[in-house]
Image: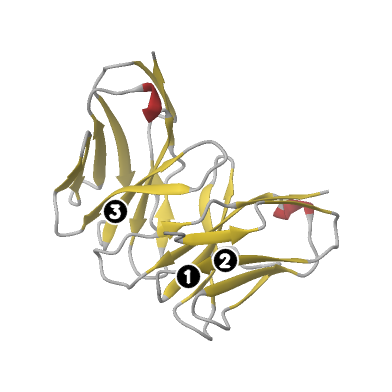
Amino acid sequence: KQEVTQIPAALSVPEGENLVLNCSFTDSAIYNLQWFRQDPGKGLTSLLLIQSSQREQTSGRLNASLDKSSGRSTLYIAASQPGDSATYLCAVRVGYQKVTFGTGTKLQVIP
Amino acid sequence: NAGVTQTPKFRVLKTGQSMTLLCAQDMNHEYMYWYRQDPGMGLRLIHYSVGEGTTAKGEVPDGYNVSRLKKQNFLLGLESAAPSQTSVYFCASLQGATGNQPQHFGDGTRLSIL
């Protein structure tokens, strides 16, 4: 059974700091890994998707990496801003019907 | 673009009442999903559909039924609501099963069962 873990559960950083969010998974036979952002009371917004054959994806200040052999992905946020405050979720897909979500890292960026 | 739209956004029910949650997507996606999100447990799959007229059970299907009569709509029904079904429900859609397709989510339905 695929298990997805995100540590830490919560993180508080000062504005401008670069930070890394972690996601680990137990089964390396994956289709892709997707990073989402969830604001309070809102749905999930897709940030980046990394296919199993890829090592990283970048969008603006965000960079996500994937190391299947070690079962790890990281989301790097450069020059953090208060607007980045949200919960960040990673989700591992192993088929069209099977996606396992982590429980998220709640990020607070302090002005 | 509307994307994935869920109705209603909020609802309070009494134990034993029934209701239907509606999910509509305008992206012509084949696959649609219903999840529930509970504190500390992440999102869990309730039911899913791989195309019009098809449905299948997910991880936590008990107490729920679904229908997909039209490709763009996926309905989640609670026949006899129970307090354990208090949760936030999310609908999602996916174009195809290849690895380069992201899953798209609605804004959720917040359901309280008293």
Which residue is located at x 35 percent, y 71 percent? B95
Q: Chain of mark 3?
A: A
Pointers 2 and 1 in contact (CB under 8 A)? yes
Q: Chain of mark 1?
A: B
> Dot 1 surroundings within 10 Å: few (below 14), some, or many (20 or more)?
many
> Dot 2 surroundings within 10 Å: few (below 14), some, or many (20 or more)?
many
For the residues labelled 2 and 1, the Cα–Cα distance comes to 9 Å
The picture places residue B16, in percent across and down from the top left corner, at: 86, 62
Q: Which residue is mark 2?
A: B23
Q: How many marks?
A: 3
Q: Chain of mark 2?
A: B
Instruction: Decide: is A66 above or below A97.
Output: above
Q: Which residue is mark 1?
A: B32
Q: Which residue is mark 3?
A: A33
Left or right of B73, for residue B17: right
Left or right of A19, for residue A106: right
For the residues labelled 2 and 3, the Cα–Cα distance comes to 24 Å
Q: Closest to the observer: B91 or B56?
A: B91
Would residue A30 be visible to someone looking at this image? no
Q: Secondary structure at mark 3?
A: strand
- Check chain identity for marks 1 and 3: say if they share one: no
Q: Amino acid at mark 2?
A: Cys
Instruction: Decide: is A41 above or below A106.
Output: below
Q: Quadrant of the C terminus of chain A?
A: top left
